[in-house]
């Protein structure tokens, strides 16, 4: 784990100002430390010399001023850290959310939503300790430690040499402890992600588990995952306490070695009392920043691990090709030319070509796993592929999914959201048209579903068939509202009875009669019979009329 990842400065620009302000505060604090030590030294030597209270007043006033300045600077460092953490977290969250669409649906499907939620929530929240405690101490180590060491060298060469020899011992132990911490900290972070994902899976499938009487078995599974997370957390704490003890011990021994050297030389008269006392007061302050870095390292480790995951997402988004946005309003027939999709070194689709004509319904059939849904995802621009996609003779291969205004797509899973049926049907429309939404429901054989009906998370409150029809209505609404002339449907009637299926089939014919290019994937012979053309995926894409 790097103390300061340069990518933080690139992806969270506000952190640059935080570092500059932190450096200014650290420099001011260094001056206050020197002033405080010198004031105490001067006061004690004056008292030993028998000075009056009037003569002590300037040095005592300086001590009070430096103490007040250090308290104010400490508060400023905490406040700056809290504000810097809030801004950096906000920037990272917004940057990651902005980057996700560029990574594409394929990447999102292969990434657990619970992992992303944990990262954007609890994970980045753990950066509070990184900004408020660890990073300020890291800045102080870079500024205060060399400055005080130079002052000590200027006052007493031997004391400076002792510091120069003993100081590297602490970073060496920090590196060794950090290597041990990295493994257990990563295990803890992975355990938290696994716990979140498992809990989400259990909640999502709870109704199915209850139907089959298997919900009780999940208690042992969740208990095992929780116990793993507890053990990894305790391992981190053990290393944290051990490292704190080692760092305090090494710093104390180093200061003691310096104190013994100064004591012997004071007795021998080889060093003035003023110099010896001043160096002794500065010595603990020399070691303090590096000790604090080690102490706060573990508190910040979880946030740093989470930020590494965020940086990996952002790096992947930067490496992704920039989507093109030209020729968005094309019209005409849809043509796929020599499309091949390879996933995990296996060809899911291989050299598939087809032509779907406006004013007709094209049915796509084939065995499960033959690549029918993948072909539709190619049309939607959601799956990387070779070959090309043309609309009206214009190459649309590089156009981003969000810019394919000519397409209306209904996937197998309608992905309904919490809200009203109207908000789900008109999803993405800033000014929903209620009448068109009602017509879309009618065409999808869902006229009995009221637009003001409230749905729960993932469309909870609807049966499987009702959810499928609402998803169809959304597809029809987009076609009507935004003039999308290519309508792609993936198993639109798999959860419907035969009577409702016939209503949906007539709706598809009406769309085709209006000039739309309708493409439907289905295993249902009754729906395929309504098509003008049919192709079978798995063989060579022969058109069956």
Image (cartoon, rainbow, N blue to C red):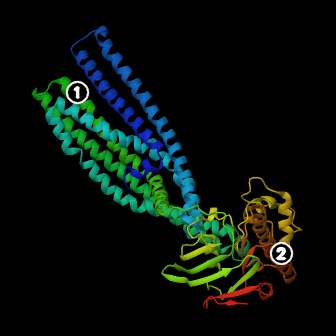
Of the pair 38 and 329, the residue shown nearer to us: 329
> Few, some or many C-alpha atoms within 10 Å of disc 1 (few <14, some 14-19, many ≥20)?
many
The percent position of residue 96, horizontal first and vertical second, equals 54, 55
Q: Residue furthest right?
A: 448
Please give the residue where the numbered disc 2 appears in the rendered image.
Answer: 510
- Considering the numbered disc 2 on the image, is that residue within a helix, a strand or a loop? helix
Horizontal arrangement in the rendering, residue 530 relative to residue 94 (left or right): right
Residue at the spot x=38%, y=32% of the render?
24
Quadrant of residue 403 in the image? Answer: bottom right
In the rendered picture of this protein, how many numbered marks are placed on residues? 2
Quarter that holds the N terminus:
bottom left
**In the figure, is residue 10 to the left or right of 105?**
left
Q: For this rendering, which residue is in front, 292 or 383?
A: 383
**Residue carrying label 1:** 277
Residue drawn 88% across the image and 68% down it: 447
In the image, is residue 224 above or below residue 130?
Answer: below
Residue at 21 percent across and 40 percent down: it is 163
List x then y, in percent, for residue 338: 56, 82
The first of marks 1 and 2 along the sequence is 1
- Residue farthest toward the front in the current orientation of the protein: 393
Quadrant occupied by the C terminus: bottom right
Distance from disc 1 to disc 2, alpha carbons, whole Å, reads 95 Å
Residue toward you, 50 or 404? 404
* Element assignment for label 1: helix
Is residue 346 positioned above or below 428 on the image?
Answer: below
Residue 226 visible in the shown view: no
State left or right for residue 512 relative to residue 367: right
């Amino acid at each position: 784990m790097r103390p300061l990842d340069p990518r933080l400065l690139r992806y969270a620009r506000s952190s640059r100002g935080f570092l500059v302000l932190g450096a200014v505060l650290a420099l001011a604090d260094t001056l206050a430390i020197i002033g405080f030590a010198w004031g105490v030294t001067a006061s004690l030597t004056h008292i030993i010399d028998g000075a009056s209270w009037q003569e002590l007043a300037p040095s005592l006033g300086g001590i009070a001023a430096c103490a007040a300045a250090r308290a104010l600077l400490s508060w400023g460092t905490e406040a700056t850290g809290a504000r810097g953490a809030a801004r950096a977290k906000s920037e990272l969250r917004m940057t990651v959310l902005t980057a996700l669409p560029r990574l594409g649906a394929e990447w999102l499907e292969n990434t657990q939503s619970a992992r992303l939620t944990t990262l954007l929530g609890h994970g980045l929240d753990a950066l509070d300790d990184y900004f408020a405690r660890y990073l300020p101490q890291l800045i102080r180590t870079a500024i205060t430690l060399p400055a005080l060491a130079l002052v000590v060298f200027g006052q007493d060469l031997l004391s400076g040499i002792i510091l120069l020899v003993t100081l590297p011992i602490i970073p060496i132990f920090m590196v060794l402890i950090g290597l041990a911490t990295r493994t257990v900290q990563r295990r803890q972070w992975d355990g938290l992600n696994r716990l979140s994902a498992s809990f989400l899976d259990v909640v999502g499938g709870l109704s199915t588990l209850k139907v089959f009487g298997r919900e009780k078995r999940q208690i042992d599974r969740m208990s095992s995952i929780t116990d793993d997370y507890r053990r990894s957390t305790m391992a981190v704490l053990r290393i944290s306490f051990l490292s704190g003890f080692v760092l305090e011990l090494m710093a104390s021994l180093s200061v003691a070695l310096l104190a013994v050297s100064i004591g012997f030389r004071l007795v021998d008269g080889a060093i003035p009392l003023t110099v010896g006392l001043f160096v002794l007061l500065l010595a603990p302050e020399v070691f303090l920043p590096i000790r604090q870095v080690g102490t706060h390292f573990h508190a910040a480790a979880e946030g740093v691990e989470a930020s590494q995951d965020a940086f990996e997402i952002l790096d992947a988004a930067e490496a992704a090709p920039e989507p093109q946005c030209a020729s968005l309003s094309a019209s005409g027939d849809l043509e796929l030319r020599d499309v091949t999709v390879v996933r995990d070194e296996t060809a899911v689709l291989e050299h598939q070509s087809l032509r779907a004509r406006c004013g007709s319904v094209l049915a796509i059939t084939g065995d499960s796993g033959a690549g029918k849904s993948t072909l539709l995802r190619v049309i939607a621009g959601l799956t990387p592929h070779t070959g090309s996609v043309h609309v009206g003779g214009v190459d649309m291969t590089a156009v981003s999914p969000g810019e394919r205004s000519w397409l209306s797509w209904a996937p197998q899973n309608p992905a309904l959201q919490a809200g009203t049926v109207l908000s789900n049907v008109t999803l993405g429309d800033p000014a929903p048209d209620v009448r068109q939404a009602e017509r879309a429901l009618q065409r999808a054989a869902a006229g009995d579903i009221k637009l003001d009906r409230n749905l729960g998370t993932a469309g909870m409150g609807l049966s499987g068939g009702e959810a499928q029809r609402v998803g169809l209505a959304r597809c029809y609404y987009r076609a009507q509202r935004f003039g999308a002339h290519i309508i792609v449907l993936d198993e639109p009637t798999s959860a419907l009875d035969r009577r409702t299926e016939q209503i949906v089939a007539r709706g598809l014919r009406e769309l085709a009669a209006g000039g739309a290019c309708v493409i439907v994937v289905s295993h249902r012979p009754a729906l395929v019979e309504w098509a003008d053309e049919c192709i079978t995926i798995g063989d060579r894409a022969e058109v069956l009329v």
